[in-house]
Amino acid sequence: MTVDIAVVDPLPMFQRGVAAVLEPEGHTVEIPNDLARWTPRDGCSVALLSLCDERYWALLRRLRDSTAELALIALRS
């Protein structure tokens, strides 16, 4: 099963590292500018969100309150 994955982190090296590990396994990895507007294809979708400052915590709250069906993995840093 392939999964659409969005990676949101301020460090491009981390974002590209996640993509480098997951893409060879057949997953689609994107680095969206606006996770709240990210539109994965049909099927399973996951967002990996680093909570490194208040902007990301606010985004987490916005995603929690939205109706989007999205599995969310939040990393506290």
Image (cartoon, grey):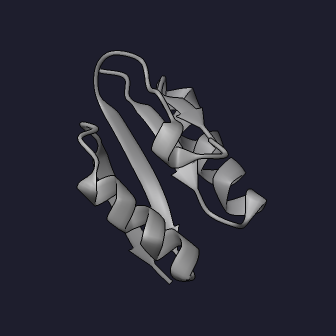
34 above or below 44? below
* Residue depicted at 57% across the width and 82% down the height: 53
16 above or below 62? above
Q: Which quarter of the rendered picture does the N terminus lie within?
A: top left
Q: Is residue 18 left or right of residue 13?
A: left
Counting from the top left corner in percent of width and height, residue 48 is at: 45, 55
57 above or below 11? below
Nearest the eye: 53 or 45: 53
3 above or below 12? above
Q: Is residue 5 left or right of residue 15?
A: left
Residue that sits furthest to the right in the current view: 12
Counting from the top left corner in percent of width and height, residue 61 is at: 34, 66
* Residue depicted at 51% across the width and 38% down the height: 37
Nearest the eye: 55 or 41: 55
Nearest the eye: 22 or 61: 61
Total label count? 0
Counting from the top left corner in percent of width and height, residue 40 is at: 44, 26
Q: Quadrant of residue 13?
A: bottom right
Q: Quadrant of residue 58?
A: bottom left
* Residue depicted at 36% across the width and 42% down the height: 46
